[in-house]
Image: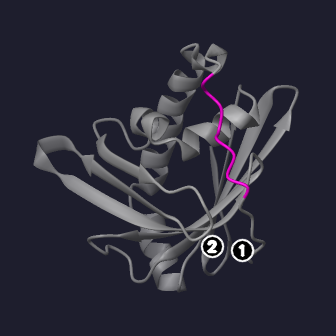
């Protein structure tokens, strides 16, 4: 995984997965799949709610090591299945000020999907707090867990495909 800070307010992470983008997109948009991989090792999603439509809400709650807990959620801004997903993100216990706008772009070539994730924060201070946190380690471990889910034969499951939302919008994330 690569992590870049192309502007004062943005973090861009890029990672490739050996799976078709429809499956990688589904792993981000189906609660039963999100619960299997999203988060650092040692953290378990105990609640994953996804209302996959523009204006719909999402919420994830984790239990972590030594009784730690964490929760965040937001609102979907753009859904262009299976190529783009955009939403707001805000943690219940705000460890950085404001909320972030998160955009995922899924590009496939020869069965390999490259995911480019852009986080746009309200300020440079918020971005810097996130960069200084163990965010990169946590995201990297989550992506390793996603590799395990994608490699577990789940891609052969005919039910493992994103459901059609039919909802689209076209905001952009300027880095």
Task: Name the residue carrying label 1.
Answer: 173
Front one among 161 and 42: 161
Is 160 magenta? The answer is yes
139 in relation to 170, above or below = above
Which circle's residue, 1 or 2, is located before the other in the chain? 2
As drawn, the label of residue 10 is 2
**Apparent side of residue 8 relative to residue 61 in the rendered image (left or right):** right
Disc 1 crowd rating (10 Å Cα; few below 14, some 14-19, many 20+) is few
21 in relation to 96, above or below = above
Res. 66 image quadrant: top left
Is 34 magenta? The answer is no
- Is there CB contact under 8 Å for labels 1 and 2? yes
Res. 155 image quadrant: top right
- Which label lies toward us, 1 or 2? 1
Count of labels in the image: 2
**Mark 1 to mark 2 CA distance (whole Å):** 9 Å
- Residue drawn at 54 percent across, 15 percent down: 152
Front one among 136 and 162: 162
- Residue drawn at 38 percent across, 76 percent down: 96
Question: Magenta-highlighted stretch: main secondary structure?
Answer: loop
Disc 2 crowd rating (10 Å Cα; few below 14, some 14-19, many 20+) is many
Give coordinates of residue 6: x percent, y percent: 71, 71
Q: Which residues are magenta?
A: 159-166
Kindly state the secondary structure of the residue where label 2 is placed. strand
């Amino acid at each position: 995984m690569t992590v870049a800070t192309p502007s004062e307010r943005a973090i861009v992470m890029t990672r490739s997965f050996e799976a078709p983008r429809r499956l990688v997109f589904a792993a981000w948009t189906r609660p039963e799949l999100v619960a299997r991989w999203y988060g650092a090792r040692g953290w378990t999603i105990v609640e994953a709610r996804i209302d996959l439509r523009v204006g719909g809400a999402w919420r994830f709650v984790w239990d972590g090591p030594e009784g730690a807990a964490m929760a965040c959620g937001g609102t979907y801004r753009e859904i262009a299945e299976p190529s783009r997903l955009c939403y707001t993100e805000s943690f219940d216990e705000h460890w950085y000020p404001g909320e972030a706008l998160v955009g995922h772009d899924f590009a496939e070539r020869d069965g390999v999907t490259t995911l480019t994730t852009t986080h746009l924060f309200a300020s440079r201070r918020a971005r810097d707090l996130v960069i200084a946190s163990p965010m990169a380690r946590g995201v990297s471990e989550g992506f390793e867990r996603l590799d395990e889910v994608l490699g577990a034969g789940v891609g052969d499951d005919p039910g493992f495909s994103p459901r059609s939302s039919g909802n689209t919008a076209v905001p952009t994330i300027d880095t």
